Amino acid sequence: MSLNWLLPIRGRRRKKSPRPTRWAQTQLRVEPLEERTLLSVGVGLSVRNGVATLAVNDNAANHVGVEKPDGVYRFSVDSGVWQTQPWQVVNKVVITTAGGDDQVIVGASVPVQVTVKAGNGNDGVFGFGPGKLIVYGGTGNDWIQQNGTGVLLAYGENGHDTIIGGPNNDIIYGGNHNDVLKGMAGNDKLYGQG
């Protein structure tokens, strides 16, 4: 990282003298910035008793993903990446999002059960792995789809949801309002509730 921006404010040393070295004084100029909004994402990852929990605590529309390509679990939220340590045993994954129209992707390399608790907003949750996928859609018009070989247990909750199962014996609860529920292959149980 270049520190050239410090050159105008850095003092110059005087020539050697019997006295201690002093620095010349320089005036620091500060220019105001225009008004702007700084965005931040509150993200927390913890692993306790074999459960890796990722909490995304903001109301923005986030893109969240989990994968296990080389023995460690990698969690991505927009442009940031968090990962577990190789020595940490993970038997389950829990992902919680707050408000906003979030997209959650469970990668094909994730072999364990993943629970997604989507907050308010029109969320999309897509599973591609062999592990069981449990989804709580929250309030909003959500799209939940199991594209992997794992079982889907989905609760659409409040909103006009579309829930599509995978090749196994899925259990799908639509929740309130007019929902579209598709079991696909397997002996599925669909509950409209609306």
Image (cartoon, grey):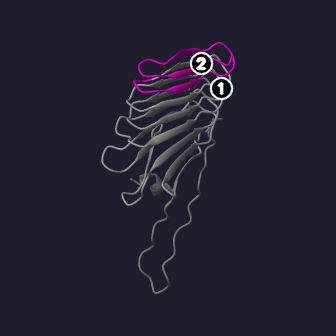
Q: Amino acid at mark 2?
A: Asp
Measure the alpha-carbon separation of dots 1 and 2: 8 Å
Circle 2: element type: loop
Report the quarter where the C terminus lies.
top right
Q: Position of residue 153 (x, y in %)?
A: 53, 31
Q: Which residue is mark 1?
A: 157
Front residue of 153/100: it is 153
Q: Amino acid at mark 1?
A: Glu
Query: Is-magenta flag for residue 188?
Result: yes
Q: Position of residue 84 (x, y in %)?
A: 42, 53
Query: Is-magenta flag for residue 29?
Result: no
> Which quarter of the figure has residue 105?
top left
114 lies above or below 87: above
Front residue of 17/25: it is 25
Circle 1: element type: loop
Q: State the extent of the magenta-drawn residues as a range.
A: 166-194
Q: Few, some or many C-alpha atoms within 10 Å of disc 1 (few <14, some 14-19, many ≥20)?
A: many
Residue sitting at x 42%, y 58%: 88
Q: Few, some or many C-alpha atoms within 10 Å of disc 2 (few <14, some 14-19, many ≥20)?
A: many
Determine contact: label 1, label 2, CB under 8 Å: yes
Q: Tell me, for residue 161, which label it has, or none.
A: 2
